[in-house]
Image: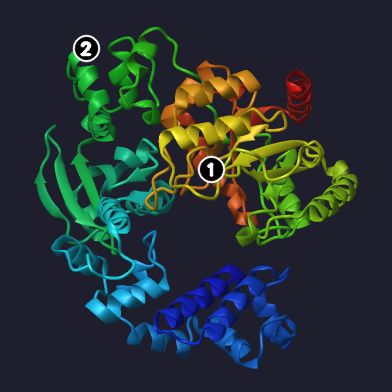
Amino acid sequence: MENRDVARLLRETARLLELRGENPFRVRAYEQAAEAIEQLDEPVAERVRQGTLTEVPGIGRGLAAQIQELIERGTSEVLERLRKELPPGLPELLTLKGLGPQRVRQLWQTLGIASLDDLEAALRDGRLNQLKGFGPRLREQLLHALSLRRRYRTLRLLAQVLPEAEALRERLRQQPGVIRVELAGAVRRLMEVVDRVELVVAGSAEAVQQVLPQLRQQSGLHGEMLLEGALPDDFPVRVALTTPDAFGTVLWWHTGSEAHCRTFVRTYGAPEPCPEEATIYERVGLPFIPPELREDRGELEAAAHHALPALIELKDLRGVLHNHSTYSDGRNSLREMAEAACNRGFRYFGTGDHSQSLTIARGLSIAEVRRQQEEIRALNEQFAARGLRILSGTECDILPDGSLDYPDDVLAGFDYVVASVHTRLNMDEKTATERILRALRNPHVTILGHPTGRLLLRREGYPLDWSRIIDACATYRVAIELNANPYRLDIDWRRIRDATAAGVPIVINPDAHAIDELDHVRWGVAAARKGWLTPDACLNARDLDELLAWLHQRRQSVQP
């Protein structure tokens, strides 16, 4: 079990203790232990093996024993008891904005509310109206959050589904009686969230049901047989069965999108059965349109004029910017992160630890910034022979008034500055736009980080006047981040073409807080391709010398 998993279980224990109304000092002890474990430079399991866990500040013998139990069993007696004693739906209430442990306990003890459904019923029938602390504004906020949660329940992130879908495809390919199989639907189009796994199979229903039992059969619209069912965790699966001769056409229909197929049929007529999908486009004089572009956003017209973009690929990225280390809330040291970037073939690695006011993420004081920059200089001497350059950057908070979290003399010392909003996210369009516009006017801002603050399937981003934001980025030569964390993918791919048309570069940043999260760029590239991004419009597809030249020219052009 990794350190982050142990920390997660300790934090769950703390939440459940708080819901029970336990001593706040005991609750805080679990939270501090979780923080201490996340900051360890070595695996906590190694500390347990050596018997040195109690040497970590904040971890006494009792907590050390529980941590050992978590590592060995994946749970602990304390955690199991709390889970049994408390209603299973109670912790989920904590995920709603505006509900902390005290309010959740109040709801449970006074009204017997122990689940999201219970809460919605109480909001609808007015039982919360007289409850202290639950005024009209909070009640409206909770109803909105519950509405979003209902919609989100049917969806999953592409990053959660695609690995399962690819594994299922490979299992089907190895099954006797299956001639051919491909992914289809929203998964194949690389949509950021999806509502099912879809596959097209040339083969027998019996062969498919060896891998996916209990699939229900029904007729499809294009001569295929549909098998409907679910994965073991109840996520929907649809398999379209067809023959090899019609495989390409059925794959095309089931890849969609519906709007793309409808526009194609209206313009060129319904495609005839054929074994290869590319033939559908060839027959009407079009080049093959990649699945991720099939959203009826001008791709057919572009194909007709031979103007489809040469989409960016993962191999085009030369480096990564905006990464975290143990200087702030990362789980690996700066050296470890740089080493991992080098091993992945990147030529530059940029830091992006949090700025000083974000104490919840252990933001760096000015003295810590200086210390990190000294380490970067030393590490660059060591990594030079391996062809890696470490760049000094910061993820600097955009404060509520639009000013930045470091003074200008500190900002001037970074190679680049990622400016992001992390606090007071509940803004209307005018407030959010003006806040970000003021930040963009600061000549030290290089990149606008995760512009809307959204978390997919968790919270919507704040609204922005995008025409003004993009115009300002073009004016002040600020790049826009496509944050590749699969929960963010922010900037939304639907905005990318507007930005690049205005000459604003996009930078695909992993926002990595650990070594494995450097691989988030896979999801960023997927979203970028949907946004028609090309390598020449991507800032970190440039070689190191080109990137440094852009940073230098930009700095010269925006100096007051």
Vertical comparison of 260 with 3: above or below: above
List x then y, in percent, for residue 159.
44, 49
Q: Which mark is residue 267?
A: 2
In depth, the one of 365 and 53 nearer the eye is: 365
Element at badge 2?
helix
**Mark 1, residues whose alpha carbon is within 10 Å: few (<14), some, or many (≥20)?**
many
List x then y, in percent, for residue 356.
70, 53
Q: Residue furthest bottom?
A: 61
Q: Which mark is residue 455?
A: none
Q: Residue at x 76, y 41 (%)?
A: 407
Q: Residue at x 72, y 32 (%)?
A: 444
Q: Residue at x 64, y 39 (%)?
A: 403
Vertical comparison of 509 with 113: above or below: above
List x then y, in percent, for residue 236.
24, 53
In depth, the one of 368 and 88 nearer the eye is: 368
Q: Residue at x 27, y 33 (%)?
A: 251
Quadrant hosting residue 201: top left
Element at badge 1?
loop
Vertical comparison of 475 with 198: above or below: above
Mark 1 near mark 2, Cβ–Cβ under 8 Å? Answer: no
Amino acid on which disc 2 is placed: Thr
Q: Which mark is residue 484?
A: 1
Q: Is 182 left or right of 384, judged from the image as shown?
A: left
Quadrant hosting residue 553: top right
Amino acid on which disc 1 is placed: Ala
List x then y, in percent, for residue 473.
59, 24
Residue 531 visible here: no
